[in-house]
Image: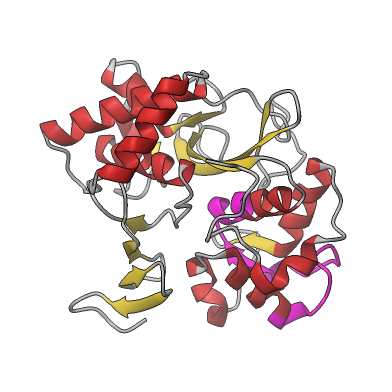
Amino acid sequence: MNNTRQTAFSDPGAYAHLFDKLPTDPRELAAVVRNVITHYRDPRVRLPADHADDVNHRWIDRLLATDQSRHDAPLDQPRAPESRVGGCCRDFSLLAVAMLRHQGVPARIRIGFADYFFVPGWHHDHVVADYWDGDRWVLADPQIGPGDWPFDPDDMPRPEDVNAPFATAAAVWTAYRRGEIDPATYGVDPSMPLRGDWFIHGYVIGELAARYGDEVLLWDVWGDMSDSIDEGGAKLADEIAALLLAADAGDEAAEAELARRYAADDRLNPRGHVTCLSPTGETFVVDLATRVSAPAPGRAAH
């Protein structure tokens, strides 16, 4: 994939002009992102109840439309935390990637797990940004910013190592299959059942989809994603994870094989349709081409 080109999800559309006068320093861009978005689960901020659906902004132009409906101001003009768009790690990182791509910088999101939030020993599902600085890929977490971290959040260790602060889903799955990690410590939150081998398996598919431009929501599901894994599903994840790690190491044949398999396999490719299991409690199906959502059978309308 050409990582300088906007995808359907990162394209700012009619709001591209908001990016024109932003700083070119990626660290400064990340600060702008944090000015636009508040994490919907941030315990320090009480978001208005009528902003709950912000978390379902799948497309950056819709996220920007929401921001501008509340502020009608440049993105770097300070916003009160409670008036920002409510989003998650994927939104912070995809907005940063959209800004970088707008400036001609190759950039992409990376999907996996981070060990630096809240609970010691727990690995939260997470999304970060990766960009090419002309010499190398630089991994950054636009959500957290400077602070008391044991690493530089704007230039993090590479994510293909399962022991890195942030590790890709492919690295985590591979380590699990080798018996090197406890999959029960990987998921959304220790208090929730969204954890374990099946959860990591789904994120391997999500990592692949994002690599080829389907940068959907973390709660979108399709294809081989399920809360259980059969032998075929595990083998599929083994193969895709191995190819992802090889491609990240520069193996062009692995990259080509990934692209071929993503295009051909309905278990991997959403084919323009996802089921959204929203944190709002709603479940609906989404046509990604028309952007039309419909309630899932037996569920309330969205």
Residue 100 sits above or below residue 285 on the image: above
Residue 118 sits above or below residue 161 on the image: below
Locate residue 280, reporting x and y percent.
41, 71
Q: Is residue 42 left or right of residue 172?
A: right
Seen at 84% across and 62% down, the residue is 76
Seen at 27% across and 34% down, the residue is 197
Q: Nearer the viewer, residue 144 or 7?
A: 7
Locate residue 179, reporting x and y percent.
28, 16
Q: Can residue 93 be found in the magenta stretch?
A: yes
Colour pattern: secondary structure
**Residue 43 seen in render:** yes
> Can you say which quadrant of the picture contains the C terminus?
bottom left
* Residues rendered magenta in the picture: 69-94
Seen at 70% across and 26% down, the residue is 151
Most distant residue in the left direction: 231
Q: Nearer the viewer, residue 248 or 179?
A: 248
Q: Is residue 115 left or right of residue 95?
A: left
Q: Can residue 133 be found in the magenta stretch?
A: no
